């Protein structure tokens, strides 16, 4: 009887999820149809020159139109590697200081309405600049959902080998369906020339729901490129990150630490163990985790240069051990957390870093 009830409950839950998604999907499509496709307010310069073969397109949002020092440093580093910077803000405006700083770095700056999230912004910019052009060899799309970079980008950018894969992400996720996470995606020449690439961006609409954007565009992009025969690869592989948690030295360290009574009751150490159990439990049950949230520690220790903004500001998935991030960044890795702490001081509410 219990098994029958459990099965019935699972089926009802799945049916409710499908119904909910169907409603969201139809509402998003209807809203997008009435919003129109294009929402650019201004362009600098008014008539952009033709861009060079390698382009980095950065999506930004700040309700006051400010551009953080971290974002400027990020863009400067990308420009130093030969990327022409296209900056797209969904803020509807830019502060005078932000605009002035950006003009020193960027080839093009678009200001648009806050409609369609990052995919809406990238789509508008691609169309406005008629990209990819015949001579475009590489396009990297990025957004400001990460704090950082905390360490130099050179080792990361050096791994974008388009002879090995057509599309590169920094991380991959199995949530919903397999996909490269869209805060950083690099497209090589073969991907840019693929009809599937143009067709995907033609279908992007300014939908109002983040869940719709994630499923249809973030997940959908990787899935459509895979179906077109393109090779998609992540620099930090999901299974390798999970396997780091299973490494015997990690468990041994915790075991040795727990032998003393104070350590067994220390909340910080307890959260580390809880998070390890969470990750290993998910692996045992084949439950997909979000690597930029649950595997933040493994990413940082593996050379990843960012921390997810939402994780530090809201921690919506309730990652157990994120309160340890400053210790990891400063104490274990010898990196400087101060730029992130500076932003948190200005904007964090009802939480401590």
Image: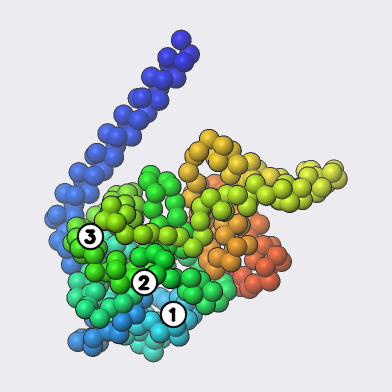
- Secondary structure of residue under mark 1: helix
Horizontal arrangement in the rendering, residue 265 relative to residue 212 (left or right) = right
Residue 32: horizontal and vertical position, in percent?
18, 55
Can you say whether 281 is above or below 91 in the image?
A: above
- Secondary structure of residue under mark 3: helix
- Distance, label 1 to label 3, CA atoms, is 27 Å
Residue 99: horizontal and vertical position, in percent?
36, 83
- Residue 351, quarter of the rendered image: bottom right
| Residue, disc 1 | 78
Q: How is the image coloured?
A: rainbow
- Distance, label 1 to label 2, CA atoms, is 10 Å
Q: Residue furthest front?
A: 163
Of the two numbered discs 3 and 2 on the same chain, state the one appearing first in sequence: 2
Residue count near mark 3 (Cα–Cα under 10 Å), binned few <14, some 14–19, many ≥20: some
The C terminus - image quarter:
bottom right
Check residue 140 in the rendering and tell me which mark sits there, or answer none. Answer: 2
State how many labels appear: 3
Residue 147: horizontal and vertical position, in percent?
51, 67
**Residues under numbered marks 1 and 2 in contact, where contact means CB atoms less than 8 Å apart:** yes
Check residue 196 in the rendering and tell me which mark sits there, or answer none. Answer: 3
The answer to whether residue 136 is seen in the rendering is yes
- Residue 116, quarter of the rendered image: bottom left
Of the two numbered discs 1 and 3 on the same chain, state the one appearing first in sequence: 1
- Residue 169, quarter of the rendered image: bottom left
Foreground mark, 1 or 3, reads 3
At x 28%, y 52%, the residue is 227
Residue 335: horizontal and vertical position, in percent?
64, 72
- Secondary structure of residue under mark 2: strand
Horizontal arrangement in the rendering, residue 316 relative to residue 246 (left or right) = left
At x 63%, y 52%, the residue is 244
Can you say whether 25 is above or below 323 in the image?
A: above
């Amino acid at each position: 009887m219990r098994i029958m009830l459990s099965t019935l409950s699972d089926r009802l839950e799945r049916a409710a999820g499908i119904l909910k998604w169907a409603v969201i999907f139809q509402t998003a499509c209807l809203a997008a149809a009435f919003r129109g496709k294009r929402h650019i307010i201004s362009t600098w310069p008014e008539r952009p020159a033709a861009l060079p073969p390698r382009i980095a397109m950065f999506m930004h949002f700040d309700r006051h139109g400010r551009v953080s020092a971290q974002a400027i440093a990020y863009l400067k580093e990308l420009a130093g590697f030969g990327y022409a910077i296209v900056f797209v803000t969904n803020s509807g405006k830019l502060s005078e200081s932000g605009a002035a700083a950006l003009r020193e770095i960027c080839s093009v700056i678009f200001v648009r309405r806050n409609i369609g999230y990052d995919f809406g912004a990238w789509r508008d910019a691609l169309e406005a600049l008629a990209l990819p052009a015949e001579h475009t060899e590489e396009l990297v799309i990025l957004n400001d959902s990460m704090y950082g970079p905390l360490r130099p980008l050179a080792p990361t950018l050096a791994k974008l080998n388009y002879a090995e894969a057509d599309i590169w992400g920094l991380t991959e996720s199995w949530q919903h369906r397999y996909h490269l996470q869209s805060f950083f995606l690099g497209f090589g020449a073969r991907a840019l020339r693929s009809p599937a690439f143009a067709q995907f961006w033609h279908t992007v609409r300014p939908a109002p729901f983040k869940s719709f954007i994630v499923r249809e565009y973030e997940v959908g992009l990787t899935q459509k490129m895979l179906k077109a025969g393109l090779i998609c690869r992540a620099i930090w592989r999901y299974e390798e990150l999970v396997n780091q948690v299973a490494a015997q030295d990690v468990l041994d360290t915790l075991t040795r630490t727990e032998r003393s009574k104070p350590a067994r009751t220390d909340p910080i150490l307890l959260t580390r163990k809880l998070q390890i159990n969470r990750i290993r439990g998910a692996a045992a049950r084949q439950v997909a985790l979000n690597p930029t949230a649950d595997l933040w520690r493994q990413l940082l220790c593996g050379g990843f240069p960012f921390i997810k903004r939402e994780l530090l500001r809201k921690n919506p998935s309730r990652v157990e051990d994120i309160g340890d991030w400053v210790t990891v960044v400063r104490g274990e890795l010898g990196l400087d957390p101060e730029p992130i702490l500076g932003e948190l001081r200005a904007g964090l509410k009802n939480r401590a870093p």
